[in-house]
Amino acid sequence: MVVDLASGFAALVGLGFFAAGTTGLLRFPDLYTRLHAITKADTLGLGFVALAVALQAPTPSLALKVMLVWLVALAASAISCNLMAGRALRSGRPPLEGRPR
Amino acid sequence: MVWLFDAVVVASLCWLAWRAITVRQLQVSIMAFLPYGLLMAIAWARLDAPDVAIAEAAIGGGLTSALLLAAARRVHGARLNEVPTKQPVPRRRRRAIAVVAAAVAAGAGWVVLWALPAATPGLGPRVDANLEASGVENPVTAVLLNFRAWDTLLEIAVLVLALIGVGRFRASVHDRQRNPSEESTLESIMLGGLVRLFLPAIVITGGYLLWRGADEPGGAFQAGAVLAGGGVIAVLAGLQRPRWFAGGAFRLFVVVGLAVFAAVGFGVMALGGAFLEYPEGWSKQLIILIESAATLSIACILVALFTAVLGTDGSGRADRGG
């Protein structure tokens, strides 16, 4: 029961981060802020969803596998974010400065 | 609630397929195709076909998209993102093609849904009845490597032919030139580090899929595709020189799957059986031998197809013509 509550709470928090990340992807003004939104907020959201699933896992090894999925996604999203932003910067796309219109 | 999940998957599949076909920029079209492959993998998993799901995730979601992007960049270069101004096909002819294609699809759908007898047992019961004799416990592997091994042999032959067709062996191979201004040192360290971190896990996953394929979902094609994915990111990160993919050892890896498969097929004939009719009690060992060799070949062929399409000059531009 306590586990179910904790699991549901983690899933809700995860969904909140996903919603925020997706809103950022759709509403932020340039590539850099959008990258920030989906690679950071979504990865944290995935972490909470993975935690929710891991709490429901029947065996500890399955729970560890789910958390491993999150670790892999964490490494991949952090580095792909850097690579994309670096490539965009060098290809002559300056980040937006000041207040967006 | 599961039907809601299925409905979202199906709706997303249809939307992505529509985007991939109708969008004018080639890169956007390919970017719609990539999640389409991943969602197809989920759809196959929901249809209780985990073998197909794994293959679809590795090949449809990963490798095909990488191949398409490499091919598109090679053909179009920097113009990849531009919206083409000229219609490649006149509007009237496009309408005619659309009408014919829709009629064919509707006809095929009608045949499947209404004209065919509704409930046939199919070949499933016969596979289950003979599963014990096949030497493996995964019915998909039993069909692919025993009952219909002939088909699988030809599939691997097709892969080898495709690679020869791409002209891998004749293509001039340049080493990937690293342009320091194009990629900062920090980024290549990060990318190289990530790939070094992931590659051992990918190799273990491939080996696991190969080994478990006898009894559970997995097998040579899934393992080969996963290993090929690792090879592709190693090439992209500059860890493996493309020149290696034209060397003698590599050519050996390309043909070893087909060679072992054919050798087993003819070998059992020498023992008095038919072509690929494994002697009793030897099925499992022979299947694992064939699958191991085939995994290596499939992985090498898929990576070689990618490097061949990439052009391997590193700039992503065509190295001759345009």
Image (tube, coloured by chain):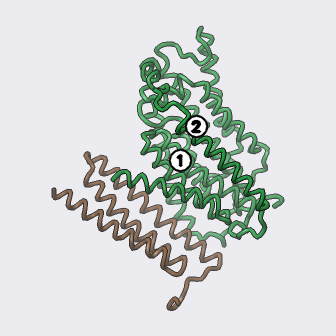
Residue underneath mark 1: B58
Residue count near mark 1 (Cα–Cα under 10 Å), binned few <14, some 14–19, many ≥20? many
Q: Earlier in the sequence, mark 1 or mark 2?
A: 1
| Numbered tag placed on residue B111 in the rendering | 2
Q: Residue furthest right?
A: B321
Which chain is green in the picture?
Answer: B
Is B140 displayed left or right of B90 in the figure? left
Residue count near mark 2 (Cα–Cα under 10 Å), binned few <14, some 14–19, many ≥20? few
Q: Residue furthest front?
A: B114
Is B314 displayed left or right of B93 in the figure? left
**Residue in the image at 74% along x and 57% along y:** B94
Q: Nearer the viewer, residue A59 or B117?
A: B117
The picture places residue B161, in percent across and down from the top left corner, at 72, 36
Which chain is brown in the picture?
Answer: A
The picture places residue B201, in percent across and down from the top left corner, at 45, 48
The chain under label 2 reads: B
Q: Nearer the viewer, residue B192 or B254?
A: B254
Quadrant housing the C terminus of chain B: bottom right
Q: Amino acid at mark 1?
A: Ala
